[in-house]
């Protein structure tokens, strides 16, 4: 790959120093990750070109993730996609999600009191989400009164929890069996696996939910092609991913490092998400730079390689990442005044920022 180094924008060099505080469990999980890389239990995949547009011109903006795990994050000079050039390969990702992801990400054992409280709160917070999802989708397609929703990367199933009360069949797929137990105990149909398992199960869906999932997929185009196979003729894929353009308002972390973890393989904008979906035979019916979008089947689509980018967007993306670093100073001041990023006052400020973002067209 024709790669230039732009880590001067972020200061994220390969020094294995964490950019986020780690508790003892997280440190142990990170050490285990390093050991598994060293002994070959985990293997890395190397992208020779942009996974979406095929360009071999890129700029490396980070050489580690927020935990200090070495990983090269690249901005495609042509389409502007932000992606991990050297992620875990497919089998290693599955092993990581099953055995390490939640403990490293959350810093708590699955059986801890904290995790139990976390799930109780999450199910309580999300019980009304089914009505929100159905309301948004019904604005762009006609939905059956009693349909089927399938969520890929469902975690404990909190996004699905409100659908059965609406008369909908809800099925969730995930690799983390400990997380899924929380949904199973609430009567949800939780199945071990991912999109390939849903296809092999022969399920058909009116809505395929992918909430904070596609950024984890090793091959997002292949993942969305499989999602298309699950859809009934008028079905839709509802996608929510961390959006690069929302980060300047304090969402998903105040600068690039806030969103970088070894399991986040892509950072989308609406345009790059559209390009990915188009290659999978899907067309956007609605979307926002949040980044949330609804896609339906595109009967006129050919899954041929994407045409060359007319106007290279890489420099625009690099300028935006530089802007994130500058605005992070403002968020640092706000957090200091408010008593830390997780204080009640900081959460209130974030809600104000999110409200402003929605007025500007962001869906966060």
Image (spheres, rainbow, N blue to C red):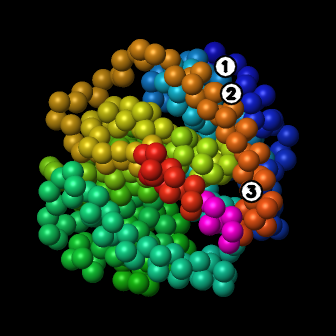
Residue 319's place in the image compared with 287, above or below, is above
Residue situated in front as seen by the camera: 249 or 27: 249
Q: Mark 3 points at which residue?
A: 334
- Per the image, the residue denoted by label 2 is 60
Q: Is residue 94 above or below residue 165?
A: above
Left or right, 59 with reference to 200: right
- Which disc number belongs to residue 3? 1
Please report whichever mark, 1 or 2, sits nearer to the chain's N-terminal start: 1
Nearer the N terminus, badge 3 or badge 2? 2
Q: In this view, does 121 lie to the left or right of 276?
A: right
174 with respect to 263 (left or right): left
> Which numbered marker is on residue 218?
none
Kindly state the secondary structure of the residue where label 3 is placed.
helix
Residue 326, how many percent across, how many down? 73, 38
| Numbered range of the magenta stretch | 344-350
Give me the C-alpha separation between circle 3 and circle 1: 36 Å
- Marked residue nearer the N-terminal end (3 or 1): 1
Who's the residue at 80% across and 60% down the image? 336
């Amino acid at each position: 790959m024709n790669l230039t180094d732009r880590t001067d924008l972020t200061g994220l060099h390969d020094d294995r120093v964490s950019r986020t505080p780690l508790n003892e469990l997280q440190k142990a999980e990170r050490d285990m990750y390093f050991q598994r890389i060293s002994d070959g239990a985990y293997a890395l995949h190397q992208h020779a070109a942009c996974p979406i547009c095929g360009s071999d011109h890129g700029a490396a903006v980070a050489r580690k993730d927020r935990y200090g795990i070495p990983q090269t994050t690249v901005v495609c000079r042509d389409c502007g996609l932000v992606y991990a050039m050297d992620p875990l390969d497919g089998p290693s990702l599955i092993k990581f999600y099953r055995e390490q992801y939640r403990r490293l990400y959350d810093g708590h054992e699955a059986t801890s009191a904290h995790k139990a409280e976390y799930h109780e709160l999450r199910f309580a917070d999300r019980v009304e989400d089914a009505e929100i999802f159905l309301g948004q989708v019904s604005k762009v397609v006609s939905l059956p009164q009693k349909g089927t929703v399938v969520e890929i990367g469902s975690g404990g199933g909190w996004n699905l929890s409100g659908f059965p009360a609406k008369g909908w069949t809800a099925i969730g797929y995930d690799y983390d069996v400990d997380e899924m137990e929380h949904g199973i105990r609430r009567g949800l149909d939780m199945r071990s696996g991912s999109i390939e398992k849903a296809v092999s199960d022969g399920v058909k869906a009116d809505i395929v939910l992918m909430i904070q999932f596609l950024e984890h997929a090793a091959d997002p185009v292949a993942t969305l092609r499989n999602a298309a196979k699950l859809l009934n003729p008028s079905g839709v894929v509802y996608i929510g991913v961390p959006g690069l353009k929302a980060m300047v308002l304090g969402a998903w972390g105040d600068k690039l490092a806030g969103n970088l973890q070894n399991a986040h393989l892509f950072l989308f904008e609406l345009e790059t998400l559209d390009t990915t979906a188009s290659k999978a035979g899907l067309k956007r019916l609605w979307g926002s730079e949040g980044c949330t979008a609804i896609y339906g089947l595109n009967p006129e689509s050919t899954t041929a390689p994407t045409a060359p980018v007319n106007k290279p967007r890489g420099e625009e993306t690099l300028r935006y990442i530089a802007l994130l670093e500058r605005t992070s100073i403002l968020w640092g001041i706000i957090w200091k005044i408010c008593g830390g990023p997780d204080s009640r006052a900081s959460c209130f400020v974030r809600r104000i920022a999110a409200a402003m973002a929605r007025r500007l067209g962001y869906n966060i």
